[in-house]
């Protein structure tokens, strides 16, 4: 079997799908995208496919991964890693379909029967956030996640800290102690404010603080972790074993959130997760993307003992699935079942994908502080 053709589809809301075709008629899917940089990711993906994947045996995943990563001497960066990630997913999809097995069976078989997922909740006031969380619990979720602050000055007033604590407190009051509440600080606050915020919010017993500092500042994680008993999470903007290595070594981390479309695909996520296990760190893959990314994440969650919970946005009303069969995202009691079909187990609705394909326009908001300086989103 060898790869004979490829196509890329840029689609709303901010996704890109890769379709690999083989001489045997099998089709494999991946999601190579850096959200907000579709053009750069498209160019990088097309170049890697044309240079190394076309004409190759797609079951030689390790060699293709290594070649895409090492062959051109210069490496690293979100765009290249995300291109490799999406191609890697499509190679696993093809290999699974060729062997007639779900990807997790090629990775050693599942260690769990179902995978816990969480739902994003929020609102512009504590009351709205509480109602949103209650709706998620009514829909069966046992874990939710929210971002408790807007833009935050480098050193903000107590009012900002109190408001964030009140926001989380309203959610806790609404859902009770049996529901987990993840908090994403989104790299939005300085190290100074992270320390104050965790101390103020801790009484509401969140599940974790995500990106309490920017990925460029992970050396500050032990300092933040020293101020809280709540688990610290990071990693959606870190890539490969080599970027996670110093984070594990320095400590102050309980949960990593690599993205299977950014960190290096299924091949690399599995290896990062194994490193995490050696440091007693859990894994909760980042996934604000489409069904291929979500399915690829589930196959890793299935085989990784230290997987904790899976992000998703597909169960949110209004998110397109581009699937002909949406059972992938059926959830009960806050869990999804493992996909059972060979490969990734996603049945892409090509007609819907082709109809939606075109230039997308997504960017984080241009938030400014009161003095006009740029604020982190
Ligand atoms: Mg996040």
Image (cartoon, helix red, strand yellow):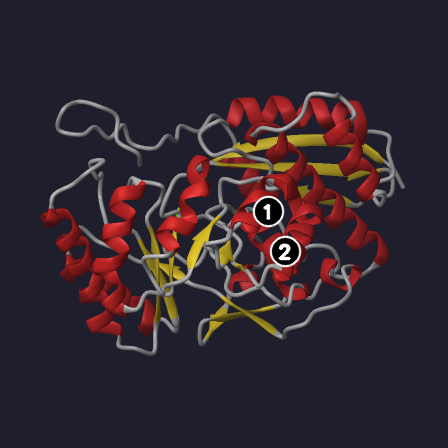
Q: Quadrant of residue 171?
A: bottom left
For label 2, the SS is helix
Q: Classify residue 191 as left or right of residue 265.
A: left
Q: Nearer the viewer, residue 249 or 338?
A: 249
Q: Nearer the viewer, residue 186 or 110?
A: 186
Q: Position of residue 174 (x, y in %)?
A: 21, 72
Q: Position of residue 205 (x, y in %)?
A: 30, 69
In this view, which residue lies farthest toward the right? 1
- Earlier residue among tags 2 and 1: 1
Q: Quadrant of residue 109?
A: bottom right
Label 2 crowd (10 A; few <14 / some 14-19 / many >=20): many
For label 1, the SS is loop
* As drawn, 308 above or below 312: below
**Residue at the spot 48% in from the left edge and 69% down from the top edge:** 331
Tell me whether circle 2 and circle 1 mark residues in contact (CB < 8 Å). no
Q: In front of the other: label 2 or label 1?
A: 2
Q: Which mark is residue 273?
A: 2
* As drawn, 276 above or below 140: above
Label 1 crowd (10 A; few <14 / some 14-19 / many >=20): many
**Residue at the spot 82% in from the left edge and 39% down from the top edge:** 22
Q: Nearer the viewer, residue 296 or 269?
A: 269
Q: Position of residue 80 (x, y in %)?
A: 62, 28
The residue labelled by disc 1 is: 260
* As drawn, 126 above or below 291: below
Q: Position of residue 220 (x, y in %)?
A: 40, 43
Tell me if I can see residue 200 in this picture: yes
**Residue at the spot 55% in from the left edge and 46% down from the top edge:** 259
Looking at the rendered image, the quarter that the N terminus falls into is: top right
Looking at the rendered image, the quarter that the C terminus falls into is: top left
* As drawn, 112 above or below 310: below
**Residue at the spot 57% in from the left edge and 63% down from the top edge:** 280
């Amino acid at each position: 079997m060898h790869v004979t053709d490829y196509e890329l589809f840029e689609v709303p809301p901010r996704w890109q799908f890769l379709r690999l075709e083989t001489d045997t008629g099998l089709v494999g899917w991946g999601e190579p995208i850096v959200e907000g940089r579709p053009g750069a990711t498209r160019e990088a993906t097309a170049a890697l496919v044309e240079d190394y994947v076309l004409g190759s045996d797609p079951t030689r995943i390790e060699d293709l991964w290594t070649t895409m990563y090492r062959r051109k001497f210069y490496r690293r960066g979100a765009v290249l890693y995300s291109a490799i990630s999406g191609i890697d997913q499509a190679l696993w999809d093809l290999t699974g379909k060729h062997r007639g097995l779900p990807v997790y069976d090629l990775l050693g078989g599942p260690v769990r029967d179902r995978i816990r997922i969480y739902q994003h909740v929020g609102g512009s006031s504590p009351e709205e956030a509480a109602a949103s969380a209650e709706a998620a619990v009514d829909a069966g979720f046992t874990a939710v996640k929210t971002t408790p602050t807007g833009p935050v000055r480098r050193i903000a007033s107590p009012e900002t800290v109190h408001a964030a604590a009140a926001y989380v407190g309203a959610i806790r009051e609404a859902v009770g102690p049996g529901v987990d509440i993840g908090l994403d600080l989104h790299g939005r606050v300085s190290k100074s404010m992270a320390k104050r915020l965790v101390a103020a919010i801790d009484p509401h017993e969140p599940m974790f603080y995500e990106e309490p500092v920017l990925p460029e500042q992970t050396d500050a994680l032990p300092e933040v972790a020293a101020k809280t008993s709540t688990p610290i999470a990071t990693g959606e903007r870190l890539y490969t074993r080599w970027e996670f290595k110093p984070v594990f070594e320095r400590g102050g981390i309980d949960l990593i959130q690599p993205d299977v479309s950014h960190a290096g695909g299924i091949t690399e996520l599995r290896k990062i997760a194994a490193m995490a296990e050696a440091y007693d760190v859990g894994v909760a893959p980042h996934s604000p993307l489409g069904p291929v990314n979500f399915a690829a994440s589930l196959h890793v969650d299935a085989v990784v003992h230290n997987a904790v919970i899976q992000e998703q946005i597909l169960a949110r009303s209004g998110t397109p699935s581009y699937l002909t069969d949406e059972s992938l995202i059926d959830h009960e009691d806050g869990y999804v079942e493992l996909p059972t079909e060979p490969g990734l187990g996603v049945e892409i609705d090509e007609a819907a994908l082709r109809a939606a394909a075109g230039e997308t326009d997504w960017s984080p908001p241009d938030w400014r502080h009161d003095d006009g300086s740029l604020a982190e989103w």
